[in-house]
Amino acid sequence: MTQRKPRLLFVEDDAGLRRQLRWSFSDYEVFDAADRETALDIVRTKRPAVTVLDLGLPPDTQGASEGLATLEEIRIEEPGVKVIIMSGNEDRANALKAIGLGAYDFCQKPMDVEVLKLIIGRALNLHTLEEELRQANQAGDNTPLRGVVTCAPEMLQICRMVEKVAPTDVTVLLLGESGTGKEVLARALHDLSPRRERPFIAINCGAIPENLLESELFGHEKGSFTGAIKQSLGKVELANEGTLFLDEIGDVPLPLQVKLLRFLQERVIERIGGRQQIPVDVRIICATNQNIPEMIKEGRYRGDLLYRLNEFVIEIPPLRARSGDALVLAHYFLNSFAAQYHSAVRGFTSEARAAVAQHNWPGNVREMQSRLKRAVLMAESDLVTAAGLDLTPGEPEAEGASGTATLREVRQHAERTAVEQALAQVDGNVLQAAKLLGVSRPTLYGLIRNYKIKV
């Protein structure tokens, strides 16, 4: 059975141009409309992935009011459709306004069919990616690495590492800044292991006072200290036959490091106040955002403990170093929170997309999650704005001399993002990425060189 062609709608009042477009885009299932009413009917019934819209529609063929009204209604009827605006040189202000209303991109008249094919291919690629993320979210995120949402080659490589080491009992040390997803990967290691049906016990070593941490880890006997009114099992014992996740392992005080090392070597514990040695079968996963080798030099951490903990090290890159992941995660969290809070929010303004891509994300994924939750709750339309994210739109590198992003700069930013996402989807295979984008391989190599994209 042949795969269905992607659906494409052209909204243009010139019948001759519509015929030319139909002929030029035979690889798509093409629909066309000459006015707003016909266009909206096709959007409702056929749900095209991409719509190319001329702003000069009847009865205002010399202006843009009818085209802009059509754009707004398309966004309401089908928020996921990618709308590309066709405009002339004199329509620059209206084209910018259309992008502010949620249009994906623009193509200047008189149009170059090859340029339009590139823009449409890019828009289709993003539409497909968003649909996959939306379906994954609705299906409950049953991917092998539950909770991991990424298109970045850096993170995809880490996912493969997790899949390989998960079935073993090797002790894993996860390194990364706060908010990069260390606990998510720890849970994935457990879920993909033979211990998946047994307990996953997590303890944050930096969140528990030093005088209570030993009891939390190893437990205590009744009467062993003031307030010990009954026997209590520690986290290590509770994780027996399962996985113990020691978060912020760099915060364990020196005296307790000795006892932790003994447990890791012999796999037996003694509760505080007890004399019985209790064997424990547990898989250890640790995480920290601290520089432990530097702590060892300063005498604040035991080197022999580190050697027990770092049998297999996974370094998680910060969000700012993950190619294309900021926009992918932003869409994922937007869809998730919109469903959770029954919100009508369905996408981002172009300024918001640019702000997400350009922000440094010092708080990483945790910051992204917090900003998106607030933006969805406070949104006053179906599009999240840069102000709603509390981000500044139009960073200096994406602005023209007037302080407003020019159409060329907006297009270059979208082009770079599309190339990065296509390469990420196919694990850096340039030939496959060129097919996804609808361009030749030499053209894609030229884009990679122009934007200095690391493959």
Image (cartoon, rainbow, N blue to C red):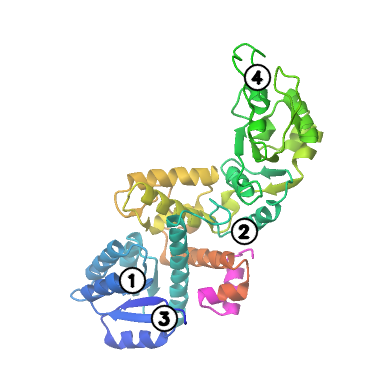
For this orientation, the residue located farthest to the left is 59
Q: Secondary structure at mark 1?
A: loop
Q: Position of residue 370 (x, y in %)?
A: 45, 42
**Residues in magenta, as a range:** 435-455
- The answer to whether mark 4 and mark 3 are in CB contact below 8 A is no
Q: Residue 47 — which label?
A: 1
- Please rate how many residues cluster around mark 2, counting C-alpha atoms within 10 Å: few if below 14, some from 14 to 19, many from 20: some
Q: Specify whether 210 is left or right of 411.
A: right
Which label sits on residue 28?
Answer: 3
Q: Closest to the observer: 96 or 212? A: 212
Task: Single out the mark in the foreground, 2 or 4.
Answer: 4
Earlier in the chain: of badge 2 and badge 1, it is 1
- Mark toward the start of the polypeptide (1 vs 4): 1
Residue 218 % position (x, y): 68, 26
Residue beneath the point at 67% across and 32% down = 236
Going by the numbered disc 4, the residue's amino acid type is: Asn
Q: Nearer the viewer, residue 321 or 303?
A: 303
| Residue named by callout 2 | 156
